[in-house]
Amino acid sequence: MLTYLPQVLAAETADLQLLPFSIGIVLGGLIVIAILNWMGRNALQRARDEALKIHENALLEGQNRAKQIELTAKDEQLRLRSVFDREAESIRAELKQSEIRLNKREDNLDKKLDTLGVKEKNLSDADALANRREKALVEKEKEIDQVVADQRTRLLQLTNLNFDQAKAMLLDRIEDECKRDAGAIIQRITDQAHEEAKEKSKMIILQAIQRYAASQTSDHTVSTVAIPTDDMKGRVIGREGRNIRAFEKVTGVDVIIDDTPGVVIVSCFDPVRRETSRISLERLVQDGRIHPARIEEVFGQVTKEMDEELLRLGREAVQEANVQNLARPIIPMLGRLHYRTSYGQNVLRHAIEVAYLSQIIADELGLDGALARRCGLLHDIGKSLDHEHEGGHPQLGKEFLKRFNEPEAVLNAAEGHHGDVPATTPYTPIVMAADAISASRPGARRESLERYVKRLQELEELAMGFDGVRQAYAIQAGREVRVIVDAKQVDDKISSKIARDIAKKIENLLTYPGEIKVTLIREVRAVEYAR
C-alpha cells in the first residue's frame, strides 16, 4: 500500500500539468467554430440575394417572352383568317359553277325526256305498222302456198308423173349437182392444202432423208457353205444319206446338194435357224468328224453362241438408236431382225433407220423425239415372231410389247404402221412416214419381176373399175398411175372426185411401200379435115 501511493501522486501531478493545454485546445476549437459560423451566414445571405436577383430577371424575361408570343399568335391568327377567307371564296365560286352546270344538265334531261317521249310514240306507230304488215305477209304466204300447190298439180298433170317420181327425179338432179359441187370443193381444198403443206412436208422429209443415209442392202434368203472337196461332200451326205438326214432333223432346215462343185445350199424360212445351221455345217466341215451325235453336239454349241450373238446385236441396235429402259426379253428379239430381210432390206437396219427418221420428223413437229425413236425401233418387232406364231407381224408385235408394259404410242405404232388399225397417237403416222421413206429410198429394197408386174396390173385394174375411165397406166415402177377419162361422161369438177376415190381405194386395198401418185387426165379433142 505504501509503495503504491507515490505512483498515484506522480500521476495526479502529470494530469495537473496537462490541464492548461487542454483548455487552450477547447478555446481554439470554439473560436474556429464561431468564425466558420459567421462565414456561413455571410455566404447564405449572398446566395439569397443572388437568387432573388435571378428570380426578378427571369420574371422580367418571361413577361417579355409572353408578350412576344402573344404578338406572334395574333399575327398567325390574322394570316390563317386571311387564308381561310380566300379558300372559302374559292369554294363558293366552285359551288356556284357546279350549280350552273347542274341547272344546264337538268335542262338537257328535260329535253331528252321530251325526245324519248316522241320516239316512244314513233315506236308504237312502227309496231302497229309491223303487225299489219305481218298479217299481210301471212296472207300472202297462204296465197303463195296455194299457187305452188296448183302449179305442182298442173306440172304433175303435164308430165304424167306422180309426186314420188317427180321427187326422185329432182333428187337425182340435186345429187348430180352436189357431186359437181363436191368435186369443186375437193379440188379447191386439195389445192389449198397442197399449197400450204407441200413446202413444209418437203422440207421435213428432205431434212430427215439428208440427216440419215444408209447403205444399200442385198441379203439373200438362202445360205451357201463351201465344201473343199468332193470327198468332204460325200462325208456330209453320209452313208445312204444318214448324215444329211440327221442334220436336217436336228436343225430343221433343208440342205440342197446339187452338181455345183464345192457348194452346199442351206434353205429355211426362219433366218436365225438358217444362219445357225450354216455355221454348224461350216464347223462340221472344218472339224471333219461328221456323224449324228457330233451334229447334235455342234448344233447345240452354235445355238448357245447364236443366243449370245442375238443379245449382242440387240444391245448394239438399242445403243445405236439411243433407246433407254427396254425390257431384256425384247433385246434378243431385235437381234433376230438382223437375220430377217424384207425385199432384200435388212429389217434391223431398217428399224434403226426408221427410229432416226421418226425422231427427226417428231422434232420438226415439236413432239417427243425420244418416244418417236422408241416407236420407230420397235415397230417391226413382230417380224421376229411371225415364223413361230400365227398372225401378221403388226398384231404379233403389239401383243409381244404389251407384255412388257410399253407405252400406248409404241403399241399403236407397232399395230397400225401399215394402216391395219386407226392411229390413236400422232407417233403412228410419223412411223408410217418414216417407214415409207426408208422402204422407198433408192436401193433400199428389191422386188421380184413377177411380183412387180402383178402390182402394176393390180393398179391398172383398180383404176379401170371406175365409171368414165377409158385407160389407166402404171408408170415409174408403180409409184404413179395415170388415168384417162372420157371427156363426154366426166367434167372437170367430177374429175377431182374420181382421182380422190381412186387414191382412197388404193390405200384400202393394196399394200405398197412409199406412196402412189394418181394423175387423172381429161381432154377434149376436136378433129376436122379440110378437103
Image (cartoon, rainbow, N blue to C red):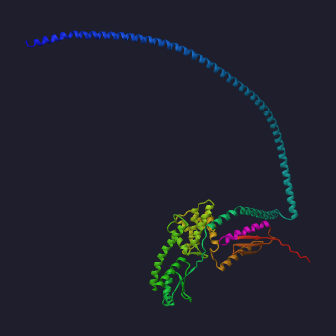
The residue stretch that appears in magenta: 492-516
Residue that extends furthest to the left in the rendered view of this protein: 2
Rendered position, 254 above or below 319: below
- The location of residue 485, given as percent across then percent down, is 78, 72
Rendered position, 275 above or below 176: below
- The location of residue 440, given as percent across then percent down, is 65, 72
At 83% from the left and 44% from the top, the residue drawn is 130
At 79% from the left and 34% from the top, the residue drawn is 112
Quarter of the image for residue 195 reads bottom right
Magenta span includes 46: no
Rendered position, 8 above or below 201: above
Is residue 232 toward the left or the right of residue 24 in the image?
right
At 51% from the left and 90% from the top, the residue drawn is 230
At 29% from the left and 9% from the top, the residue drawn is 30
Main structural element of the magenta stretch: helix, strand or loop?
A: helix
In this rendering, does residue 462 appear at all? yes
- The location of residue 357, given as percent across then percent down, is 61, 66
- The location of residue 250, given as percent across then percent down, is 49, 81
Of residues 47 and 143, the one nearer the viewer is: 47
Magenta span includes 506: yes
Q: In which quarter of the image is the C terminus?
A: bottom right
